[in-house]
Structures are given as C-alpha cells and as structure tokens.
C-alpha cells in the first residue's frame, strides 16, 4: 500500500481534465479525495477542459471544446462536450508525437483510447464524465484509491482541505501551486526540463516509478505530522 501522509483527511480538488502533477501530489498524500464538479461554471478556469503536454517543440495545450452553457449560472457538471470537429484525433496524434519515444507510452496508451477515439462524445457526453474516465485510469496506474463519486463525506470526524481553482489570468500571482522537483523527460537534453505538465507526462516518462516520485514529492510538499485515526 502507498504510504499515506494524511490517512484520516480528505482533499477536494477543483475541476480538472488530465490534471497536472501538482493536482495528483495531494491525491497521493491524503486518505480520500474527490473532484468537486458541482461548482459554478467559470469560463476563466481553462484547466477544467485543457491540459498541457510536452511536444517536440515544448509545452503544448490540448483543449476539449465545450458546448455553450445554457446559462451563465450553470455548474461544471452540466457542461457538455462539443460535437464539432474531431478533436479526439488531434489529441491522440499529439500524444503519439509527444510521447511515442518514451519508455512507457506503448504500455499505457491503450487504456486511454476510449477517451481518444471516435464516439467519445457519445460515451462521455458531459465534460465531467470524460474527466472522470481519464482520472479512473490515471489513479489505477498510479496505485491510488479511486476518487469518491461525490464530495467526500466529512461527517465522520474527518478533516477536509479544499484546493481552490486557479485561473490562467491569476497564474502570475502567489498561488497554492506546489513547487515540484524535476524528473527525467524524454527530450530533456534538447529542451531542458519542462515543469507544469499533465500527470500523463510523468506516467509516460517514469511508468511505475511515478509512484516513487509522487511519494517523495508529497513528503517534500506537506508537513509530516503523524495522524492517528479514531
């Protein structure tokens, strides 16, 4: 079993698609976690339907287009995926180009094909269902507990921490983004180390060693007070 730093605590994450490594470090550190898709839709929060990979020329953002919300007051779990354009083909080809030479791409990519092939908009018509499908596979690969179906229950003596959304316009300000150590990347010799990428970058480059990285990163990022469950 993974060494959980806070086994008696929950963490609630903001809406994310193929979240960054900084999103999965707290998932590793806390006993239970969930993503709260019930929050109000905010078009500034691009990370809810966009993630960043390392292409042959550097960082590349992949965006899942979303349909225009029916109301400005709708929630993220009501947002539908746009049916226009074969964006899933663009994403699959981009991932193949970016990570085809990494040690673990061929080992893991088949697990993600349901989210990267024709018919994806029928399988996952809502953005949050697509994001949860990605998250299930990612957590299974990383060896963490499945996400709670809903926001974790805090009524049984469990402390809960919440990570607020961070808008692209606010990224220059002081934020809760974790400062993470570098790891080996397939094009590091030519591009240097690229930070701020999707967890997919860690998985394709490190494979099973991603668990070791997350464990070390969690211990560096959080206090290590031992907690006893009552």
Image (spheres, rainbow, N blue to C red):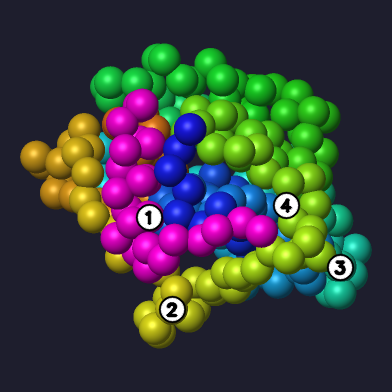
Residue at which label 1 appears = 218
According to the picture, the residue beneath numbered tag 2 turns out to be 175
Callout in the foreground (4, 1): 1
Decide which of 181, 229 is in the foreground and name it. Answer: 229
CA separation in Å, label 1 and label 2: 17 Å
Where is residue 117 drawn, in percent x and y? 64, 23
For residue 167, side relative to residue 22 (left or right): right
User: Which numbered disc flags the more N-terminal residue, 1 or 2?
Assistant: 2
Q: Position of residue 138 (x, y in %)?
A: 54, 34
**Who's the residue at 14% across and 49% down the image?**
192
Q: Quadrant of the C terminus?
A: bottom right
Badge 4 is on which residue?
A: 66
As drawn, is 160 to the left or to the right of 191? right
Magenta: main secondary structure: helix
> Which contiguous range is marked in magenta?
207-230
First reached walking from the N terminus: tag 3 or tag 1: 3
């Amino acid at each position: 079993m993974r060494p959980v730093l806070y086994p008696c605590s929950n963490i609630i994450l903001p809406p994310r698609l193929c979240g960054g490594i900084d999103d999965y470090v707290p998932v590793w550190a806390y006993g239970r976690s969930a993503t709260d898709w019930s929050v109000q839709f905010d078009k500034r929060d691009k990370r809810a339907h966009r993630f960043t990979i390392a292409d042959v020329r550097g960082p590349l953002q992949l965006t899942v287009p979303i349909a225009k919300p029916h109301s400005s007051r709708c929630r993220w779990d009501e947002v539908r995926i746009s049916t226009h354009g074969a964006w899933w083909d663009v994403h699959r080809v981009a991932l193949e180009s970016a990570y085809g030479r990494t040690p673990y791409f061929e080992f893991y990519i088949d697990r993600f094909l349901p989210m990267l092939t024709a018919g994806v908009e029928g399988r996952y018509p809502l953005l949050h269902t697509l994001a949860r499908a990605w998250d299930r596979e990612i957590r299974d690969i990383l060896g963490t507990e499945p996400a709670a179906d809903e926001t974790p229950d805090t009524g049984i003596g469990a402390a809960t921490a919440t990570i607020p959304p961070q808008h692209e316009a606010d990224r220059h300000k002081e934020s809760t983004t974790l400062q993470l150590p570098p790891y080996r990347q397939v094009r590091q010799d030519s591009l240097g180390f690229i930070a701020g990428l999707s967890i997919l970058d860690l998985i394709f480059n490190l494979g099973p060693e991603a668990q070791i990285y997350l464990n070390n990163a969690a211990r560096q990022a959080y206090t290590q007070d031992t907690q006893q469950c009552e």
